[in-house]
Image (spheres, rainbow, N blue to C red):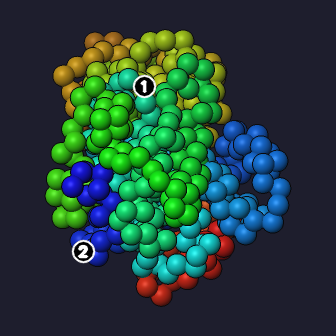
Amino acid sequence: MSATAKLAEFTTSDLRLPELVPPRLRDLVLDYIGISAFASNHAENVPAVRAAVDALDPGDGQTTVIGEPRGYHSQYAALLNGCYAHSLDFDDTNHLQIGHPGAPVISAAFAEAEDTGADGRAFLEALAVGYEVSCRVGAAVGASSYDRGFHLTSTSGIFGAAAAVARLRSFDKETVEHTFGLVLSKAAGTMQYLANGAWNKRLHPGFAAHDALVCATLAGAGVRGAAHAIDGQYGLLRGYSDDPRPAALTEGLGETWTLLETAIKPYPSCRFTHAAVDAALALRTRVPETERAQAEIRIGLSPTAMKIVGEPVTAKLRPQGSVDAQFSVYFQVAAAWLDGKLDWQSYQRIGATDLTAMIDRISTEVGELAAHETVVMARIRDQEYTESVPLPLGEPDNWIGDAALRGKFTGLAGPVYGVARAEAIAGAAAELGTGTDMRTFIASLRA
C-alpha cells in the first residue's frame, strides 16, 4: 500500500486519540475564532477580498463566515474564513509542517460541519485527521520545499483540509484517495509575496480550504483522481521538494500525533521573528528606559530565519505595510524593544521616526542555531546584555498557557462581539464534544 493510500485509510479509520488531543484542538479552535473575528474587522486586505467574494457569491448561501452577518455558499465561506484566519499572521504554526495547519483545516471543517450538522465529537475527529495529514505531508516535503519558495501552509494544508472534509462526509478509503489525487492538482502557493508584501499569502489558506471542498465534492460524485498523489512518480514529494522524507507520512501514524507539535503564537508576525521578540522583551527590562534608544542590537538567526526575516533588504529595513513588517526581524525587535509589546497595533508604528531610528541600530548575523532559536545582544556604551531563546513562547514545550490564550482570544474577539459574548463563545469552545451541535455553535460566530 502506498503512503498516500495509508493516509487515506487513516482518514477513515477508528481513531484512538490521546488524552491531550481533544483539549489541544479546542484551544486551537478558540485561537482560530479570535484571530478570524478580529481580522474580519481590522485586517487591511479584508474589504477588497470581501468585495470580490460578494461579487462571486451574491446569492443565498447559509454557511457562516466569522465576524460577518450574511451567509455564503460553503466553498466561499471556507475561502473567507481561511483568509481571515491567516490575515494577521497570528494563527497556529507547526514546526514539522513548516506551516500553519489550522487556517485551511478548520476553515474547511467549519464549512462542512455547519452544512451537515455534525456533532462536536465528529468535528474534533475531523480536525485531528486534518491536522495530522497536513503536518505529516509538510514534514515529508520538508525544508527544501520551503527553501524553493513553496508556501507549505497551502501546499500541504490542502491535503489536511481535504482529509477533514472527507472524514465528515464519511468517505471510504478509495474516495479519499481520489480526493487526494484531485487535490494534488490544486496544491499551490509560493512565497513570491515577499517581493512586495502582497496579500497572496493571506489568501493561500482560503484557496486551500475552498479547493478542498471542491475536490471532495468531485470525488464524492465519482470523479477519478490521480493515484499515489503524494508519493508517486510525479506526486507532491518529487515535484515540490529536493530532499523529501516519505517516511514522515506514515511513521507512527495513529500512534504518534504530530499535531501535538502545533504552537500558538503570542505575536502577530512570522514565527521566525518570535524568539528574537522574546529575547528583546526580556533584555529591555535590564536596560534603563532612558538608554534603550541608544542601544546597538545584534541578532543571531538560523540560516532559514535569516533568509525569511533577517536579510537587510529595503522591505525589511523600511517596511511599507504590515506584511513587510511581519517578515522583518528588524521591525519586530525595534517595536518590542521600544514599546514593551508586540501586537496588531504595532503596525500603526510603521514609518515612525523613533522606530525607524531603532531599526538602523539593529544588525543580524547567521549562527549555527536551530530554525527558531536566537541569540540577541544589546550594547550600550561598554555594557553588553545577552539573551538566548532556544524555543519561542507558544511551542508545546514552552506553552502559552490557559490564561494567556484566553487573554489573546478576549483581546481579539472582544472588540467584535463584546466581552460578554466573547466569553460565552470561549466557554462553548471549551466544551466542544459529543453534545455540541456544530451548526448552532458555528452560526453563533456571525457578527
**Amino acid type shown at disc 1:** Gly
Using the image, tell me which numbered label, if any, was put on residue 16: 2
Q: Residue at x 29, y 35 (%)?
A: 233
Residue 179 in the image: state x and y as whole percent.
45, 55
From this view, report whether residue 243 is shown above or below residue 89.
Answer: above
Q: Residue at x 41, y 46 (%)?
A: 226
User: Label 2 crowding class (10 Å Cα cut-off): few <14, some 14-19, many 20+?
Assistant: few
Q: Which residue is mark 1?
A: 149
Q: Are marks 1 and 2 in contact (CB under 8 Å)?
A: no
How much space separates mark 1 and mark 2, taking CA atoms? 36 Å
From this view, report whether residue 83 is shown above or below residue 173.
Answer: above
Q: Is residue 256 left or right of residue 427?
A: left
Whether residue 334 is visible here, answered yes or no, is no
Is residue 262 or residue 204 the one in the foreground?
Answer: 204
Mark 1 lies on a secondary structure that is loop
Whether residue 314 is visible here, answered yes or no, is yes
Is residue 313 or residue 105 the one in the foreground?
Answer: 105
Using the image, tell me which numbered label, if any, was put on residue 77: none
**Amino acid type shown at disc 2:** Arg
Q: Quadrant of the C terminus?
A: bottom right
